[in-house]
Every structure is written in structure tokens, then in C-alpha cells.
């Protein structure tokens, strides 16, 4: 079975072209980013581990191909040349991907992926993978994670989740999807998918309909703040000048959810955030309920551990989560953080000490850092 690494993007837009159902397996977007980084760097070490194809040209290449790199949105990733050709792409005459010989690490990764994909339910124990590949379990785990950014178990979980999404998109009911995806029980299906989808399978099947989000806008030291919540925690914190603009942004981010204003149930959270921005409540420890990949959650947890009044560079955060080469991915996770302040992405700066980016404006980012430094000195 050919592996299409990017069959399911992080948010899976409905308009995304679907490839052959004969090649349904997938890994998360965070592993796709690792492969795209290898393509961008012309990394010959990954030759043989996968090939990339370009939608606009109909050609596929090895990662080290010297050709000009297309935009990432035009790239499809395949585990081997046969899969790319089955999807209708032809081999590049410049890099000759059919003749590519991967290094031992690339061969090991491909072997592990194939073993997981060939399993009926994708649940291949690490010990068995180690026996099949002739490596120790620790070495296999470390090598796979270093190359792909995820563990073999996370690969298997993502593969099963992608198959679940595919079955639900076909219109199958949850029970039938459970059978096709081979979850051990309905409770296991809901336990795993709710954490990874950010909603139950039935809600996902309806395109996110049924999510109930309430919000409140209030004046704060930085203009206006919008706090949106579900019954489980905070889903969004936005900063701006006009409440109407913030509400519009919330509806754009959650287009199919039921959104209503005037929340009173969680008004305490709003007060805590407003007081925090005023410097009267320096430490926040509020629950969140956001849809995120496992990688994003790891980054956001790392951000919440940065002490008040301090900053970290994107590189330091990447090293802190055990992925020192994932600097760009960390920056993207910061940029896509929906719960500003609660998840303090403003505490991450560039290596040279400059602020970098901030969705709510660099003036607000600098203001936040200055306020937090003063608050830390008072403690």
C-alpha cells in the first residue's frame, strides 16, 4: 500500500483534492512539516525514505533534487516511487528518483511505516517493530522520532485517526466507522478521537456542528479582549481595538459552531484575564479547550511553563520539547495559538532578541512583556 503522507492536512479544508482511496494512510501535519523541511534543505539523507510530487507539474522527485522548490501547498508526499506513479505522477529526469538509495536511517523509517500500515488495526507493539527491524526498542524509537518528529505509536494513532476521518467523510455512521477502523471498543474510539479531533466523532461527521461556544468582550489595559469558552475551558482569547472585529474573528475561526454572547457562567475567567492584563493578577492557571495537534499541545504546554517576566527563543522552545530542528514548526504553533495570554506565546522571541511576530500587534507584545517584567520584580 502506498503511503500518502499529506492526505489529511491540519484542518482538512473541504475543497482539498482527494487522492486515490487505494492510498489512504497518512501521518500528522507535524511529520509532514519535517519532510517538507528535508525537501527545502535538499537533504540527501532522506533520499529513499519518501518522494515528493508537485501538483502543477505532475512530476515527483527525491528530497535532494536540485530543482527549484515549489510552494508547500503544491507538494504531495509519498513513501515510495510506485505510490507516486500510481497517483499519476512521472519521475523527474533530473534527479532520477527511481535510482535513489536511502541511507540506513531512511530505510529503517520506511520499514517501520510499512510494518505499521500492514497491520489490520495499526497497533504494532514497539517490541515487535524492534524485532522485525533488528534494532533495540530504544534505538528504534529515538531514530524514528528524530527523523519524523513523532514516535511509531503516534504514527499508528494518526494513521487510524485519518482512516476514521475518511470513513466519517464518506457518510458512514460512527458504529460502522468503528468497525472499519478496527478500534477495540466504542469507548476507546471516543476516548482517543475526542482528544485528537477536539470533538466527538459524531460531531466531526457533522462538520463541527453542535459545538457550543459562548463569549464575552471587555475593556482591558490593551484595548478590548474577547474570551470564548466551552463548558470544558477557554477556547479563544483575542485582543484588539473593537469588540465587533473580535467577534467576527471568532466566528471565522469556528464557522460551524453555535456561538452566543453574554456568557455569565465563566465570567470569573474573564475577570481574571482582565485583572492579569492590568497587572493585578500576575499568574494565570485557567483550563483550555482548544482543537490542536499533539505537537501544538506540546509547544503550548512549554509556553505555559515559561516563568513570568522571562522569555524564550523559538530555538530554546524547540530544544525544550526535544525537537531542536523544529524551530519553524514551533513558530507556527505560536502563531496559531488561539488562547492568547492564557497560553503566553508573547513570551517567545527571536534568537537576536527582537520580538518576532504577534497576531495582536508588536506594540501589544512589547507592552505585555514590560508589564510582566514589572510584575515579576514586585513578587
Image (cartoon, rainbow, N blue to C red):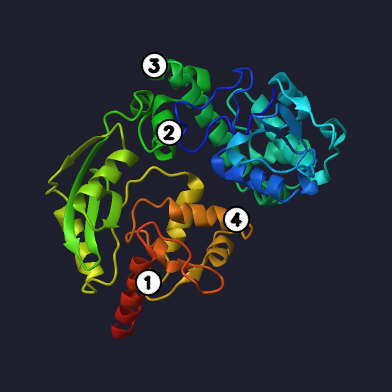
Image quadrant for the C terminus?
A: bottom left
Please tell me whether residue 234 is drawn above or below residue 309 in the rendered image.
Answer: above
**Residue that carries the numbered disc 4 in the rendered image:** 326
How far from the left and from the top, in percent, is residue 331? 51, 57
Which one is closest to the eye, mark 4 or mark 1?
1
Looking at the image, which residue is at 21% across and 74% down? 280
Can residue 228 be seen here? The reply is: no
Give the tally of numbered discs: 4
The CA distance from mark 3 to mark 2 is 15 Å
The CA distance from mark 4 to mark 1 is 25 Å
Can residue 161 be seen here? The reply is: yes
**Residue that carries the numbered disc 3 in the rendered image:** 173
Query: Sequence-wise, which precedes: disc 4 or disc 2?
Result: 2
**Residue that carries the numbered disc 2 in the rendered image:** 193
**Residue that carries the numbered disc 1 in the rendered image:** 366
Query: Sequence-wise, which precedes: disc 1 or disc 3?
Result: 3
Please tell me whether residue 103 is drawn above or below residue 273 in the rendered image.
Answer: above
The CA distance from mark 4 to mark 2 is 26 Å
The CA distance from mark 4 to mark 3 is 38 Å
User: Who is closer to the viewer here, 363 or 301?
Assistant: 363
How far from the left and from the top, in percent, is residue 370? 34, 77
Query: Sequence-wise, which precedes: disc 1 or disc 2?
Result: 2
Amino acid at each position: 500500500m502506498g503511503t500518502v503522507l499529506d492526505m489529511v492536512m491540519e484542518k482538512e479544508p473541504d475543497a482539498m483534492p482527494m487522492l486515490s482511496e487505494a492510498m489512504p494512510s497518512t501521518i500528522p501535519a507535524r511529520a509532514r512539516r519535517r519532510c517538507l523541511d528535508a525537501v527545502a534543505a535538499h537533504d540527501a539523507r532522506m533520499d529513499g525514505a519518501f518522494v515528493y510530487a508537485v501538483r502543477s507539474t505532475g512530476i515527483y522527485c527525491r528530497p535532494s533534487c536540485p530543482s527549484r522548490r515549489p510552494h508547500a501547498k503544491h507538494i504531495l508526499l509519498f513513501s515510495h516511487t510506485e505510490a507516486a506513479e500510481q497517483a499519476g505522477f512521472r519521475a523527474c529526469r533530473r534527479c532520477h528518483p527511481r535510482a535513489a538509495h536511502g541511507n540506513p536511517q531512511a530505510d529503517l523509517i520506511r520499514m517501520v511505516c510499512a510494518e505499521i500500515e500492514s497491520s489490520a488495526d495499526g497497533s504494532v507493539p514497539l517490541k515487535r517493530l524492534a524485532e522485525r527491524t533488528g534494532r533495540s526498542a530504544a534505538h528504534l524509537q529515538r531514530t524514528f522520532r528524530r527523523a519524523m518528529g513523532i514516535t511509531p505509536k503516534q504514527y499508528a494513532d494518526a494513521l487510524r485517526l485519518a482512516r476514521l476521518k475518511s470513513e466519517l467523510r464518506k457518510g458512514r455512521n460512527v458504529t460502522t466507522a468503528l468497525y472499519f477502523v478496527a478500534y477495540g471498543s466504542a469507548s476507546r474510539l471516543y476516548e482517543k478521537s475526542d482528544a485528537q479531533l477536539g470533538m466527538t466523532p459524531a460531531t466531526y461527521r457533522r462538520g463541527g456542528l453542535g459545538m457550543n461556544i459562548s463569549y464575552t468582550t471587555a475593556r482591558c489595559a490593551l484595548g478590548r479582549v474577547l474570551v470564548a469558552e466551552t463548558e470544558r475551558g477557554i477556547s479563544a482569547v483575542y485582543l484588539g481595538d473593537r469588540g465587533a472585529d473580535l467577534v467576527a474573528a471568532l466566528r471565522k475561526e469556528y464557522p460551524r459552531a453555535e456561538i452566543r454572547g453574554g456568557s455569565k457562567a465563566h465570567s470569573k475567567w474573564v475577570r481574571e484575564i482582565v485583572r492579569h492584563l492590568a497587572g493585578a493578577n500576575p499568574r494565570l492557571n485557567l483550563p483550555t479547550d482548544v482543537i490542536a495537534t499533539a505537537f501544538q499541545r506540546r509547544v503550548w504546554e512549554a509556553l505555559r511553563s515559561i516563568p513570568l517576566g522571562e522569555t524564550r527563543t523559538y530555538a530554546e522552545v524547540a530544544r525544550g520539547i526535544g525537537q531542536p530542528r523544529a524551530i519553524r514548526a514551533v513558530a507556527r504553533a505560536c502563531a496559531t495559538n488561539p488562547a492568547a495570554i492564557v497560553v503566553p506565546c508573547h513570551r517567545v522571541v527571536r534568537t537576536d532578541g527582537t520580538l518576532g511576530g504577534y497576531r495582536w500587534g508588536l506594540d501589544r507584545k512589547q507592552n505585555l512583556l514590560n508589564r510582566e517584567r514589572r510584575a515579576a520584580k514586585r513578587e
